[in-house]
């Protein structure tokens, strides 16, 4: 039968760790996390520096504020949830079987690492790599390895660093741990206190029969726990892979620089997590909660999935610059969709095309210059309305058409549109234009071809009814121009629509 | 009797102060060209517009500049290459481009917007947008052709574009092998342009009394820096630059032989 082997990871003071993970600039400062409704907030979590300063759990805000240099942050459930997902994801790199073992403000999980020696080496090595991976993700944790589930859990919760409990020595390693680890109710805890039982070792030394007689059968379970001998049925959880980062700001953020500073950190985390699964980021979904109950949402979709941090940050910067939030930002959520890393096989004789990632940044910059809807590819509408088109986003075709054959044909007359059309006054003779112009220019019609009547959509407000004339006209300077003159039949208004050029 | 080479060295050394290497052929850059698809124009330009250089197509309205540019883009996009049209005047007509054979999916169109406060006499906003957009596209690379449409920009405004800007465009076009075509009423790029073409309308052909069927245009090369024939005889004193006429049919006219 295969021997059981468990590794427990325990991250104490998780609310503080989750916040400090996003606010890296506070890592070297004493930080306490407050929860509850103002003004009755109490400290629920704090880092080591805050403990050294004299802060303790359960302190009121007033007491905490009296400690000089102590930074106070509000607890954020969403930040913790995002951090917890990252925590479990890191653990999932070492074993697919994970059971959650969080208690109180700590985040903990137990990994079934039986049979992983060939992958990660000895247990100590695995524990070190596990702890290093978590440290890289921004978590300070302790790791304990044992053949007993509960022994690993107790040891990780009560000691710092890495502990490997040899087989059959669980009782010895647990002996000095406090009895509070068992999670006893108040009455039984008091009973044990009266008996002078304060450690697991002292509890394990008691006679099982005597103990059960006095404290009913549950006492036998406590005694087995204290000896590190209680068996456990492993209940693995399905670690969900979601690329989401959240940050709740203490004070409303108005400057985009601050947002980008946070965004850069989030993108770094998302890229690292996606890359660890051999994936890239296909899209980034920005959501912000703004002051005044406003919401902000934008989506950044690169041409190809990428793991280029600088490129994604540039897209984020351009997107925020093009669409700045309408109010101060209270929280910032960045969710990414994972995509497969694409590889493009380039050909020696293939036509040159813009590099997709660079083109994305260029188009974003062009949109910032010319306008969101004024950059793209024109697409002709399925309509008889003259000059109708719509703009679509420009995408370079992955497989451009073959350059083998180029059709030879005569060039076609092209129009240069006037947007908006220039209103003109027209002189008619025998229902044909003979001269037209406005205050600045006047044209004498040499030849007028037409009229070409066009109408449509009469059933809607976007209907048109027009009369087109192809005009050859002479300008004041004596040059000849070919132009398109249009009469709006509904309003009997003439306009110069375009020049043949 | 001295040999020919000795004579050449003797003459060159005597003229050295005034004409360095007077009888030695100067090495010339032969630049790659891209055809415009108009046979007469390609013949005039010895193959087409230069690749990786600035070409200026100038002329007044109805002189065929836009038709020529669209014909050029048509050739480039049909070969699977990506092109861009920076439209300072927002005058581009997508229907005409499609009728000319331009693959619109391969074309990036930048429509410079007018600022509400800008008057007609102060079109700096559009011009500035167009120049900045062109700069970005040239620096990005990968575009085979880029048309900077300043066709409706007044000469007095276009001529105020700094020479440094054109020089930068020339460098970027050379580096990214992009044919930058500048449409305008007069030449703007000055010494940075590799080719300056002047367009003019000659006559309008009517198939029948009621339909505009085609237009004839004339094209003159005002400047062509890189000719592919390095040793072609030069006729000094030719005051009139080479010219060619070509015609464009209207989109509704059936193709000959079709």
Image (tube, rainbow, N blue to C red):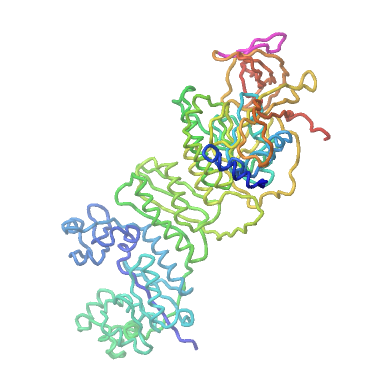
Residue drawn at 71 percent across, 11 percent down? A431
Q: Is residue A392 visible?
A: no
Q: Name the spot of residue A316 as percent of width and height, x first.
A: 44, 49
Residue, far front: B1
- Residue B11 sits in quarter: top right
Q: Which residue is depicted at the point 76% across and 22% down? A: B205
User: Picture coordinates of residue A444 (x, y %)?
Assistant: 65, 12
Direction from residue A272 to residue A459 in the image, left or right: right
- Residue B121 covered by magenta stretch: no
Q: Looking at this view, name the residue that lies furthest to the right.
A: B257
**In this rendering, is residue A62 above or below A47?**
above
In the rendered structure, the answer to whether residue A26 lies left or right of residue B178 reads left
Q: In the rendered view of the protein, which quadrant contains the C terminus of chain A?
A: top right
The overriding secondary structure of the stretch rendered in magenta is strand
Whole-percent x and y of residue A258?
Answer: 34, 49
A56 or B46, nearer to the observer: B46
Q: Nearer the viewer, residue A241 or A320?
A: A320
User: Above or below — where is A277 with respect to B162?
Assistant: below
Q: Is residue A64 left or right of residue A237?
A: left
Residue A147 visible at all: yes
Q: Which residues are magenta?
A: A425-438
Q: Position of residue A50 (x, y in %)?
A: 22, 64
Q: Residue at x 48, y 43 (%)?
A: A365
Determine whether, in the image, residue A344 is placed left or right of residue B202. left
The magenta stretch spans residue A432: yes
Q: Is residue A115 above or below residue B8?
A: below
């Amino acid at each position: 039968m295969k021997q059981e082997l468990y590794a427990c990871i325990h991250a104490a003071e998780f609310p503080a760790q989750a916040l400090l993970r996003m606010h890296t600039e506070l890592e070297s400062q004493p930080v306490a996390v407050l929860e509850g409704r103002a003004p009755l907030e109490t400290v629920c979590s704090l880092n080591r520096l805050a403990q050294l300063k004299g802060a303790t759990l359960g302190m009121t805000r007033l007491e905490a504020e009296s400690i000089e240099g102590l930074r106070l942050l509000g607890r954020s459930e969403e930040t913790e949830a995002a951090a917890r997902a990252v925590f479990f994801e890191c653990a999932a790199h070492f074993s697919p079987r994970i059971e959650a073992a969080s208690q109180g403000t700590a985040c903990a999980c137990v990994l079934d690492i039986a049979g992983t020696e060939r992958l990660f080496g000895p247990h100590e090595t695995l524990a070190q790599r596990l702890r290093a991976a978590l440290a890289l993700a921004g978590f300070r944790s302790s790791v304990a390895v044992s053949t007993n589930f509960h022994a690993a859990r107790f040891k990780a919760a009560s000691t710092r660093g890495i502990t490997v409990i040899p087989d059959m020595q669980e009782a010895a390693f647990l002996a000095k741990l406090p009895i509070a680890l068992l999670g006893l109710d108040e009455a039984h805890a008091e009973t044990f206190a009266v008996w002078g039982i304060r450690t697991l070792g002292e509890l394990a030394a008691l006679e099982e029969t005597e103990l059960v007689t006095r404290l009913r059968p549950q006492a036998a379970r406590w005694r087995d726990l204290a000896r590190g001998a209680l068996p456990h049925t492993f209940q693995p959880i399905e670690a969900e892979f979601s690329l989401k980062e959240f940050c709740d700001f203490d004070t409303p953020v108005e400057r985009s620089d601050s947002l980008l500073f946070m965004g850069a950190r989030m993108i770094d985390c998302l890229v690292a997590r996606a890359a660890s699964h051999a994936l890239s980021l296909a899209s980034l979904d920005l959501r912000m909660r703004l002051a005044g109950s406003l919401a902000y949402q934008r989506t950044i979709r690169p041409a190809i999935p990428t793991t280029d941090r600088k490129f994604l940050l540039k897209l984020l910067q351009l997107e925020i610059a093009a669409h700045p939030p309408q109010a101060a930002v209270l929280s910032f959520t960045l969710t990414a969709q994972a995509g497969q890393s694409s590889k493009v096989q380039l050909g020696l004789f293939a036509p040159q095309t813009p590099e997709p990632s660079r083109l994305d940044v260029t188009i974003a910059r062009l949109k910032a210059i010319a306008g969101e809807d004024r950059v793209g590819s024109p697409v002709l509408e399925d309509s008889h309305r003259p000059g109708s088109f719509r703009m679509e986003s420009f995408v370079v075709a992955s497989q451009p058409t073959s350059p083998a054959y180029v059709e030879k044909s005569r060039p076609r007359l092209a129009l240069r549109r006037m947007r908006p059309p220039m209103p003109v006054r027209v002189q008619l003779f025998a229902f044909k234009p003979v001269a037209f112009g406005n205050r600045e220019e006047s044209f004498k019609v040499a030849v007028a071809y037409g009229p070409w009547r066009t109408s449509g959509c009469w059933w809607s407000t976007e209907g048109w009814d027009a009369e087109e004339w192809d005009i050859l006209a002479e300008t004041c300077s004596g040059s000849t121009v070919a132009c398109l003159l249009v009469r709006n039949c509904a309003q009997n208004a003439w306009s110069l629509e375009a020049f043949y050029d | 009797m001295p040999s020919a080479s000795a004579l050449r060295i003797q003459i060159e050394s005597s003229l050295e102060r005034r004409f360095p290497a007077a009888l030695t052929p100067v090495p010339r850059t032969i630049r790659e060209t891209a055809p415009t698809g108009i046979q007469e124009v390609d013949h005039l330009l010895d193959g087409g517009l230069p690749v990786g250089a600035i070409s200026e197509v100038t002329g007044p309205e109805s002189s065929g500049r836009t038709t020529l540019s669209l014909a050029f883009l048509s050739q480039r996009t049909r070969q699977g290459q990506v092109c861009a049209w920076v439209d300072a005047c927002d005058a581009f007509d997508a229907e005409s481009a499609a009728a000319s054979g331009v693959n619109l999916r391969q074309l990036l169109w930048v429509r410079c917007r007018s600022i509400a406060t800008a008057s007609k006499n102060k079109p700096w906003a559009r011009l500035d947008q167009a120049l900045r957009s062109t700069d970005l596209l040239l620096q990005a690379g990968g575009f085979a052709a880029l048309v900077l449409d300043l066709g409706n920009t007044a000469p007095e405004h276009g001529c105020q574009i700094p020479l440094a800007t054109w020089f930068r465009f020339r460098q970027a076009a050379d580096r990214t092998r992009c044919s930058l075509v500048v449409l305008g009423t007069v030449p703007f790029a000055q010494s940075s342009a590799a080719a300056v073409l002047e367009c003019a309308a000659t006559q309008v052909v009517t198939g029948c009394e009621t339909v505009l069927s085609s237009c004839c245009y004339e094209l003159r090369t005002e400047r062509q820096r890189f000719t592919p024939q390095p040793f072609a005889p030069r006729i000094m004193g030719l005051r009139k630059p080479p010219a060619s006429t070509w015609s464009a049919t209207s989109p509704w006219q059936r193709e000959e032989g079709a």
